[in-house]
Amino acid sequence: MSEPMLFAVPTALGYFSSLVADDASLSVIEAAVSIGQDEYPDLDSQAVLAEIDTMADRLKRRIPADAVPVQRLRWLNRYFFQELGFAGNVNDYYDPRNSYLHTVLATRRGIPITLAVLYIELATQIGLMARGVSFPGHFLIKLRMHTGKQHGEVVIDPFTGHSLSRDELDELLAPYKRSHGLTGDFDAPLGLFLQAAPARDVLARMLRNLKEIHRTAADWPRLLAVQHRLVILLPHAWEERRDRGLALAELGQHTQALDDLTAYLEHRPEADDRAALAARMAQLRSVRQPRLH
């Protein structure tokens, strides 16, 4: 009698790595759901995705087959923001649970980017062209509206559900422009800030939100988990490798920390923080090597 075939269950990081390995097949919704497995190891990603599909199917059944994009958008907004009650978590904006899609589904509260990822998935499933926009300080949704020969765009704030006018977008952007000297002769057009965000950038922004929360709390184990994902997602973003090394150092994993910090300095030889990191690395080596007696 032949032995039964055994298949190794992929780790959470292994699963994430497979999801983001190739841009052509990268599913933002599935990779975004999987981020929650760091905090919730038993999370069933496929069950969460099935729940989202059920929401989309329920909406699809209500929309007439001949509905034009503007009509589909009205159905979606009414369903997402009014019936389902999704909204921004104004009471606890920096709660890390706002970054986990399965908890956003459960509580109907989130931050702009998680609400946008869910909204965009539903929009796509009902035939709308929706993309995320990495607007400074606030993630937005852009929808392309085609009706006959007419073309236009609608920009929605996923935190409030409001459609934003050009004047409102300019007002949102003004503080960023002032702080970066983008005024007067150096003014930058609004359209430059409304470009659709690539899938990898959306996931990176989600992870960096968590990164900032955990770094502010000096929660090194959780920060390290996020850094592992950022290094996998952005293998050539050497600053993420540096930040993982610093988290490893805080956790006493000096050999791995030195590997990451060395890689960073090799690829960023002119880095402004080179001297500070060299001193930190010397300290790590002295701790790692036992004293001779």
Image: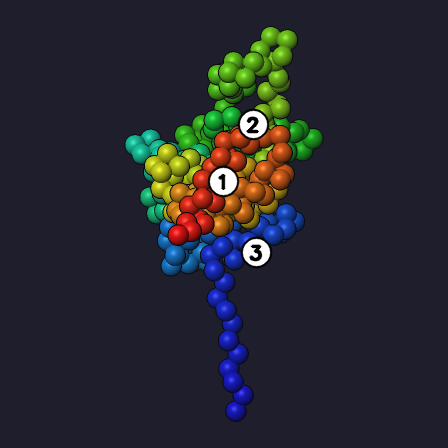
Hey, what amino acid is under mark 1? Answer: Met
Q: In the rendered structure, which disc, 3 or 2, sits on the residue that comes first in sequence? A: 3
Q: Nearer the viewer, residue 170 or 276?
A: 276
Could you say where residue 172 lies in the image, as x and y percent from the top left? 48, 20
Q: Nearer the viewer, residue 151 or 139?
A: 139
Sort mark 1 into few (<14), some (14-19) or many (20+) by Cα contacts within 10 Å. Answer: many
Tell me the distance, in whole angstroms, between the alpha carbons under discs 3 and 1.
Answer: 32 Å
Q: How is the image coloured?
A: rainbow
**Figure quadrant of residue 143:** top right
Could you say where residue 281 lies in the image, as x and y percent from the top left? 49, 40
Tag nearer the camera, 1 or 2: 1
The image's mark for residue 174 is none
Tell me the distance, in whole angstroms, between the alpha carbons under discs 3 and 2.
Answer: 34 Å
**What residue does disc 2 label?**
272
Tell me the distance, in whole angstroms, between the alpha carbons under discs 1 and 2.
Answer: 15 Å
Q: Is residue 34 in view?
A: yes
Label 1–label 2 contact, CB within 8 A: no
Q: Nearer the viewer, residue 113 or 242?
A: 242
Q: Nearer the viewer, residue 146 or 231?
A: 231
**What residue does disc 3 label?**
18
Hey, what amino acid is under mark 2? Answer: Asp
Q: Residue at x 37, y 53 (%)?
A: 40
Tag nearer the camera, 3 or 2: 2
The image's mark for residue 281 is 1
Sort mark 2 into few (<14), some (14-19) or many (20+) by Cα contacts within 10 Å. Answer: few
Label 3–label 2 contact, CB within 8 A: no
Per the image, label 2 sits on a secondary structure element best described as: loop
Q: Residue at x 42, y 35 (%)?
A: 212
Left or right of 289 on screen, residue 267 = right
Tag nearer the camera, 3 or 1: 1
Hey, what amino acid is under mark 3? Answer: Ser
